[in-house]
Amino acid sequence: MATKGRPKIEIDWDSAERLAVLHCTGEEIAAFLKVSYDTLVRRIKREFKLTFAEWLKRNSAGGKISLRRSQFKAANNGNITMLIWLGKQWLGQSDIPVVNESTEDNKDLDALANLIDSLEVRKPDDA
């Protein structure tokens, strides 16, 4: 007896997962696998009982780990840009200096303000 419909397309799930790790889009993964995006979504639902978004999130996590490892390696090797960026992202550091009332600059400004206040301002009619 003949089967109805087209034969089932074989999907290379190892390749699909490696592409997800690289944060490829669903359309890019489907194009690489030579299937439509809709077919990819349906097959993920059938094979893994997940939505495409759930499958992609699960499989792309490895890419984030790899990227984070590379960033730490670059920072530990003295990459100043990466050290600054990681400090800003994870340590709350910034380029904006915090004005503190006890700094030497503020003491100088306070002294100048006191000097100005102590000077007599002469009005033109006092001449």
Image (cartoon, helix red, strand yellow):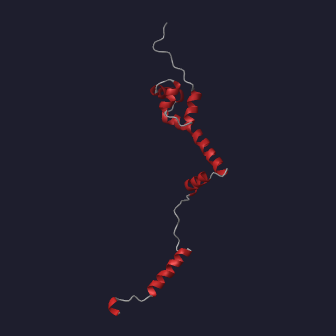
Most extreme residue toward the left is: 125
| Residue 45, x across and y down, in percent | 49, 29
Is residue 85 placed above or below 119 in the rendered structure? above
Picture residue at 44% right of the left edge, 85% below the top = 117
Picture residue at 52% right of the left edge, 75% below the top = 106
Q: Which residue is at the front of the view, 85 or 113?
A: 113
Is residue 55 placed above or below 12 in the rendered structure? below
Quadrant assignment for the C terminus: bottom left
All told, the count of numbered labels is 0
Picture residue at 53% right of the left edge, 60% below the top = 95
Q: Which residue is at the front of the view, 90 or 118?
A: 118
| Residue 68, x across and y down, in percent | 60, 45
Most extreme residue toward the top is: 1
Res 88 quadrant in image: bottom right
| Residue 83, x across and y down, in percent | 61, 53
Question: Can residue 2 be seen at all in this image of the molecule?
Answer: yes
Picture residue at 50% right of the left edge, 77% below the top = 109
| Residue 124, x across and y down, in percent | 33, 89
Q: Which residue is at the front of the view, 8 or 114?
A: 114
Decide if residue 83 is on the left or right side of residue 110: right
Most extreme residue toward the right is: 77
Most extreme residue toward the bottom is: 127
Question: Can residue 51 be seen at all in this image of the molecule?
Answer: no
